[in-house]
């Protein structure tokens, strides 16, 4: 799996490893913004073409709703799938592949003469454009890490949100202009020049992915990307879409299928070593899950107005597609302005509260809109939803970036869009139900009442979410996003009484860490590492253990980064795994609760794939592999102490699963034996997040230095 921060080109990297000049210049961000805008613009531009398509193909207007839902369904699945593929194969490769697919889709749609062909084009557009946003989020994070920034500048993430939010709102206006002048096919052929420009900019401005593509066997590849999880997710979404598309008729078999497939998906993902949809993470990380729900409900309300009001303007008010699109232009402008304002703020709670209030105000105002309402008043109502869309999109994206695991940011970003598209699918069902007997004022008012309920729910969720306030408080204590992390302190001649030390800024540490600080400077100092006398212990990174902890992908990826550091700097590597032979199992007494249960269940049997070191962590000839028969790494079939002494190791860097198991027991025992200890806080995990937090904050800092994988290079450099 490519490690975060690897994306680079030799000619643009300084000796320190950071891009020269502005790492977030126009050459880098322009293709990202353009690529990320392709999906939302295709989501909205079709709105003004539906009536014209129905007339050209001689079908009812209601039948064209499949062109909306087909793209939404495809995008809902493809967004997180593209994020997972970007994590696995490299974000630039997936970004370029997606844009190429959009080119093909533009050609297919431009030549289509049937509804079936248009559906195919929309599915291809959904799949291709879905790569833009999650790949862009990964590229931005990696560029920030590569440049030595604690986080990317706020305006960079803000720009990504602005392009997405603004294009959703201005899509109908652009579509109205294009379709009014060039016909409905313009909604498809416009993708050809835009995708061509985006492809050129991406090839010229984004560095190649450094790691070669690693496919492996089909079975291994399917396991790494969790192909069955993707298929289950797609099946449950498809069944849900069929149910929503049938409304107001209740398709009970489709709903039952959606629920059964969702339950089966959850069961599968709880057992998967690298789940596509990390159910444990969603349960454990309430702030992230609430962000998904809040984003989906907010976009549901926005899209209900976007599609419902557009159809009402064209049918009930008799406006042309061009005129309807033009009326929504202020909505797009205010979306961009609101997104820009919010992107410059560190806080997220009050923008989200304001977003929910505006959504409620807009919903209530829509109740008073009718055929006799002045056009200026209708524009004012749409403007309120523009402010809602801009503020909500940026603030929710910021919360996602703060709460999502770094190594799984691609999948997490895709899931944010997925929840948005589920909301969009639901909005299409709401609009279709309200206008089932014809587009009318009463139908618009029915939509407004649904909006009132949605906005009230969003407001309650936001006001009661205490994590938003805590996140704002934490953020105000940190340096501005984009601030460069200080490098190693200037070296001084060490003395016997004072080892060489290097400064590690607090912004690089996970939130759970607690470190002592130099009271005169406010910075934390950590003894430097001598790789020749250091051993990296990677403990219990086995499928049987990975399935029990939240964010196994992220922890596993950071363990891989630590392994790469050890290889590059000449540190010793020790793989520790837990497994029992038949003899070991027979020797376990019944009063040993942990291992007697494991013996009874048979899930720690030596020689099985479940107890092997994870395939992504490759051992080499000089590495030491230890099989342990109890929790501590020292309780093994190999004399670990003797092996470490033979290698002149006096320093241990620990990473493992779980925090309350092998990490706790090994760290305490190693501390009693006077090893210098470093714990990779971001490469550990525990089934119980609260236990993990307490150990990290209250226990471990008294015996070990808590660092992150990003600290390793600076610490080892300072020792040279």
Image (cartoon, rainbow, N blue to C red):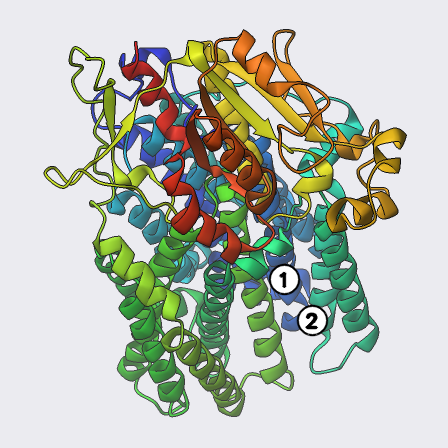
Q: Which quarter shows the C terminus?
A: top left
Q: Is residue 115 above or below residue 717?
A: below
**Horizontal and vertical percent for residue 561?**
49, 25
| Residue position for label 2 | 245
Question: From the viewer's perspective, is 581 left or right of 506?
Answer: right
Residue 40 in view: yes
Task: Tell me: residue 505, above or below residue 115.
Answer: above
Q: Position of residue 47 (x, y in %)?
A: 50, 64
Q: Position of residue 568 (x, y in %)?
A: 46, 12
Residue 240 as seen in the image, left or right of residue 490: right
Query: In the visual, does 647 lie left or right of 120?
Result: left
Query: Residue 153's image quarter?
Result: top left
Residue pictured at 16% horizontal, 10% vertical: 493
Residue at 43% over, 47% down = 699
Residue drawn 62% across the image and 30% down it: 633
Q: Which mark is residue 69?
A: 1
Q: How many marks?
A: 2
Residue 48 sits above or below residue 209 on the image: below
Q: Say what secondary structure mark 2 lies in.
A: helix
């Amino acid at each position: 799996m490519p490690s975060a921060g690897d994306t680079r080109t030799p000619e643009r990297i300084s000796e320190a490893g950071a891009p020269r000049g502005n790492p977030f210049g126009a050459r880098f961000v322009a293709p990202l913004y353009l690529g990320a805008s392709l999906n939302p613009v295709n989501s909205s531009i079709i709105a003004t073409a539906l009536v014209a398509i129905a007339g050209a193909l001689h079908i009812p207007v209601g039948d064209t709703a499949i062109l909306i839902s087909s793209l939404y369904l495809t995008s809902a699945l493809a967004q997180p799938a593209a994020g997972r593929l970007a994590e696995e194969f490299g974000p630039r490769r997936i970004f370029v592949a997606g844009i190429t697919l959009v080119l093909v889709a533009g050609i297919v749609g431009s030549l289509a003469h049937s509804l079936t062909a248009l559906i195919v084009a929309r599915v291809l557009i959904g799949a291709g454009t879905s790569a833009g946003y999650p790949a862009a989020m990964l590229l931005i994070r990696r560029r920030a890490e590569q440049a030595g920034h604690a986080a990317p500048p706020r305006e960079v993430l803000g720009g990504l949100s602005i392009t997405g939010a603004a294009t959703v709102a201005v899509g109908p206006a652009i579509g109205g202009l294009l379709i009014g002048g060039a016909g409905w096919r313009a909604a498809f052929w416009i993708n050809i020049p835009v995708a061509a420009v985006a492809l050129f900019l991406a090839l010229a401005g984004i560095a190649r992915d450094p790691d070669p593509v690693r496919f492996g066997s089909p079975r291994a590849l399917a396991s790494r990307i969790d192909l069955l999880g993707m298929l289950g997710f797609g099946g449950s979404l498809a069944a849900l879409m069929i149910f929503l598309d049938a409304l107001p008729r209740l398709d009970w078999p489709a709903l039952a299928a959606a629920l059964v497939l969702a339950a089966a998906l959850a069961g599968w993902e709880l057992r998967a070593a690298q789940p596509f949809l990390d159910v444990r993470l969603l349960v454990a990380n309430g702030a992230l899950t609430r962000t998904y729900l809040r984003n989906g409900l907010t976009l549901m309300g926005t899209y209900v107005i976007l599609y419902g009001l557009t159809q009402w303007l064209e049918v009930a008010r008799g406006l042309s597609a061009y005129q309807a699109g033009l009326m929504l232009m202020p909505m797009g402008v205010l979306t961009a302005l609101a997104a820009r304002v919010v992107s410059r703020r560190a806080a997220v709670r009050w923008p989200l509260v304001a977003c929910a209030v505006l959504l409620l105000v807009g919903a209530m105002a829509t109740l008073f809109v009718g055929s006799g309402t002045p056009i200026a008043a209708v524009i004012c109502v749409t403007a309120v939803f523009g402010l809602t869309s801009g503020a909500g999109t940026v603030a929710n994206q910021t919360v996602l970036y703060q709460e999502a695991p770094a190594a799984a940011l691609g999948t997490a970003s895709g899931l944010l869009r997925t929840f948005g598209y589920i909301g969009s699918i639901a909005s299409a069902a709401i609009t279709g139900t309200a206008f089932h007997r014809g587009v009318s004022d009463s139908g618009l008012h029915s939509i407004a009442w649904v909006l009132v309920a949605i906005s009230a729910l969003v407001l309650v969720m936001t006001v009661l979410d205490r994590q938003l306030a805590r996140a704002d408080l934490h953020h105000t204590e940190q340096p501005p996003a984009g601030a460069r992390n200080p490098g190693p302190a200037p070296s001084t001649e060490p003395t016997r009484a004072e080892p060489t030390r290097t400064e590690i800024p607090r912004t690089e540490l996970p939130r759970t860490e607690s470190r002592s600080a130099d009271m005169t400077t406010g910075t934390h100092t950590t003894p430097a590492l001598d790789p020749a006398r250091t051993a990296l212990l990677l403990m219990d990174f086995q499928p049987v253990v990975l399935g029990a902890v939240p964010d196994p992908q992220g922890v596993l990826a950071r363990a891989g980064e630590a392994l790469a550091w050890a290889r590059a700097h000449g540190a010793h590597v020790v793989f520790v795994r837990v497994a029992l032979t038949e003899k070991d199992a027979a020797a376990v007494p019944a009063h040993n609760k942990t291992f007697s249960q494991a013996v009874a269940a048979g899930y720690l049997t030596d020689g099985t794939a479940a107890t092997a070191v994870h395939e992504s962590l490759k051992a080499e000839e000089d590495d030491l592999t230890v099989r342990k028969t109890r929790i501590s790494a020292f309780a093994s079939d190999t004399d670990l102490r003797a092996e470490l002494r033979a290698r002149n190791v006096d320093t241990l860097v620990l990473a493992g699963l779980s925090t309350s198991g092998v990490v706790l027991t090994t760290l305490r025992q190693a501390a009693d034996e006077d090893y210098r200890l470093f714990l990779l806080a971001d490469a550990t995990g525990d089934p119980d997040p609260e236990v993990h937090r307490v150990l990290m904050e209250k226990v471990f800092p008294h015996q070990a230095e808590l660092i992150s994988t990003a600290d390793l290079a600076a610490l080892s450099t300072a020792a040279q």
